[in-house]
Image (cartoon, grey):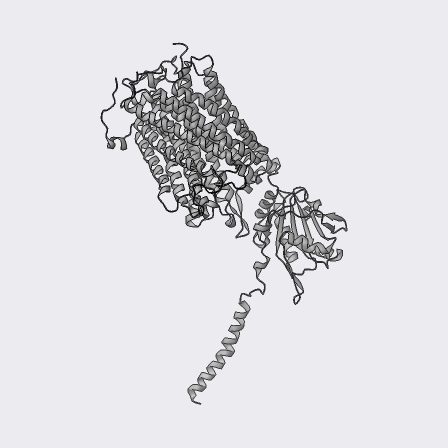
Amino acid sequence: MSALCRYLLFGLVTWTLFVGVPGAGWAEYFRQRESDLDQGLFRIDETRYLGVKLDTDVALIDQTGKALKLGDFVDKPLILVFSYYQCDGSCSAVNGEVIALLEKVIKTMRAGEDYRVLTLSFDKADTQETMAKFIAKLAMPPELKAGWTFARLADPERIKEVTEKVGFRFFWATQDKIFYHPNVAMVLTADGRVSRYMYLLVNSPLDMQVALMEARQGEIKPHEVINYAISLCYSYNYKEGRYTYNIPLFVGLGSFLFGIGMLLVSVFYYKIRRKPR
Amino acid sequence: MSTASSGFSLKEWVFTTDHKRIGILYLIGSIAAFTLAGLMALLIRIEQSSLGPTIVNPNTGGDQYNVWLYFHGAAMILGFLIPGLTGFAANYFLPLMIGAKDVAFPRINALSVWLFFGGIVLALLTFIVSDPPDVMWTGYPPYSIRTGGNTALYVFTVHLLGFASILGAVNFLVTVIYMRAPGMGWNQMNLFVWSTVTAFIIQLVFVPVLAAAVTMLLFDKYLGTHFFDPSAGGDVLLYQNLFWFYSHPAVYVILLPALGILFEIISTCTRNMVFNYKAAVYGGMWGIVLISGEVWVHHLYISGMPDWIRIGQMVSTLLISVPVGLLTISLFGTLYRGAIHFTVAMHYALGCLFLFLVGGLTGIPLAMTVLDVHLSETSFVHAHFHFIMGIFAAFTVFAAVYHWFPKMTGRLPGAAMGKLGFWLNIIGVHVTFYPLFWIGVKGMPRRYYDYQMFPEFEPFHKIATLGAFIVAAGMAVTILNWIISAISGEKSPENPWKSGSLEWTHCPSPPGPGNFPKDVTVTADWHPYTYGKN
């Protein structure tokens, strides 16, 4: 072996040991991991499910053991969150996110009076105990407690029927022993129809407030007129999953003011022009 | 006495800044639009006269029919009714009625008529381009964005005609405010002048909203924006709101000058003071201006909205019948104990009162939410707005042409042919639209070229089509009468109807440049309607 070859071999081994291996490890560490699951699977087809009405006769058991019906929640707007109480992943985060958003909305709308929240388990294995543990982990402010119910279905066999009705799909991953499910809160109108899906990671408190205001379908109290007017300034962007400015409204309003401006200017301009110098 | 220039010069007409010639140009353009729109109406009626495709291509039937509907609606409203009333009538008569020598901005006035003709040419391209617009006159998205039709032609037509009317509005408002004859107070103005002022205020304030809406439509279709695309944060219903925010007040832009013309004719031909002049002006016309911007939502009752908005809009829509009622009372009151002269114009004016009653009364169920949900998008609506807007306003334009024919031409219009045309028109209108009211209540949808699901409606459509041909005959007789009378009609005296209005008493027929041989001054006791005192 020639000296040149030896030097090259030595250089290659050295580079591999000190640069290549750490570099590859470094690159692997920072590599954007691709999920094994297509996130699109969890996306709810809003064109199909918006406006769907929940079955009001579905029997529930709440955190106190009291028997309820889904119909008990449909006299005012409802935020419905499907979770499972043994979830050690996103369910706590999803409920926590709803709490964080609603804490900002508390000043304008009150839980229990203006809307309700229902966290409903989609896991047959959930019990009163798992539910209690789940609730204990959430830092629920007292203002929200009054309007927030945690529950599970009295008849677990109806879970699929209830979730599929509103387009919520979930899968049990045997290997990971977790449910894969969309992180979504559904906003329902006072007659139990789905009016908005909120994909929580992209939503702001304003989104939640506007969604709740929309869900009230124009039934507003006198002190909410300003909030209602603000809600009209936004329209839901299905691509981005959040509310964005309703630009045509501003353009229309601007052009209306332009018309009034022209009326005034045309009259006053001529008056000024006619004044003797 | 006439100071009119002799001889015809095309250049003088094209580049004229004379308000009277501009008025005549508006009349020619708007009658041309009306004629073509009428031909489209005949095609529509022939198509509906039998079940299945009648004259449309069975493969592209819907598209072809949509193009006819588009042209008929756009040409009638944007090309005939608004320019006919606020372009022709206001241009010719308003400065004469207030004793002005011209309008405040004559060159802007000329620009406005050029823009109007530009809009008419764009509308006519519908018959030339391979992808004509097929979006009705409303242009609702998402259809107007997805269609293969040329939405741009629609948008630019609206732009040009809208801009023309804005220029006209500025001009006439300034003219009335500052160029009235010395001594003429606000309460001495003709009701046509008042009606034009109020119509132009509505036009000036609301037209920019329509222009903005159709511009955003253009951007959505051709530049890939998403103003009205809900999937990207746009608001598709907002277009309907913006459109009707202008287009319902536009009904009053048509209605007000039309009523103003009726006041002039009825007062003159009954030799009577206008009944309740101040109530008509301040309660009726200004009442309409104030309420007109709050009633558009009744066009969207079935589009989804909170109940309280529906009820609020129902109340405000019904409320506008109060000022309209004041104007109606004034019109009928003016007839009371009048010495009625049945001129051709008076025939049309009386016909208009009846059309107005039918159109107004059939509007009440459409204002009421419970009935409107059933009647929306049926031929009942179609028949209603043809009575209250299309035919009523068209008849007032004909009445205006007949009444001021001696003023414009110096000749009397042929009375026999005029009355024949009137009777054909009024009979034809009723034969056409009463069946449509009836089948509308039964569920006949609007805008369908075929109605296989309702074969029982076919005889009604046949009757309606017969009526349309009677109207067409009436219109042909009318226009022919104008042409014959203008060429060889009997010479008219200076004031054939014995009117007290300035355009008849102080200026020759036809008026020359500068309108009045001498400066006009009016006294405090002068009024255009003081017939009882003379």
The one of A151 and B144 positioned closer to us in this rendering: B144
Outermost residue, left side: B7
Quadrant placement of the C terminus of chain B: top left
Up/down of B533 relative to A226, above or below:
above
Image quadrant where residue B118 sits: top left
Outermost residue, bottom side: A1
Image quadrant where residue B474 sits: top left
Quadrant placement of the N terminus of chain B: top left
Image quadrant where residue B19 sits: top left
Q: Residue at x 48, y 36 (%)?
A: B244
Up/down of B330 relative to A252, above or below:
above
Q: How many marks?
A: 0
For residue B486, side relative to residue B62 (left or right)? left
Provide residue B319's location: percent of width, then percent of height. 54, 27
Provide residue A43's location: percent of width, then percent of height. 58, 56
The one of B145 and B288 positioned closer to us in this rendering: B145
**Is residue B345 visible from the viewing direction of this image?**
yes
Q: Residue at x 22, y 24 (%)?
A: B6
The one of A222 and B492 positioned closer to us in this rendering: B492
Provide residue B425's location: percent of width, then percent of height. 42, 26
The one of A34 and B227 positioned closer to us in this rendering: B227
For residue B102, side relative to residue A8 (left or right)? left
**Is residue B86 visible from the viewing direction of this image?**
no
For residue B69, side relative to residue A70 (left or right)? left
Provide residue B43's location: percent of width, then percent of height. 42, 37
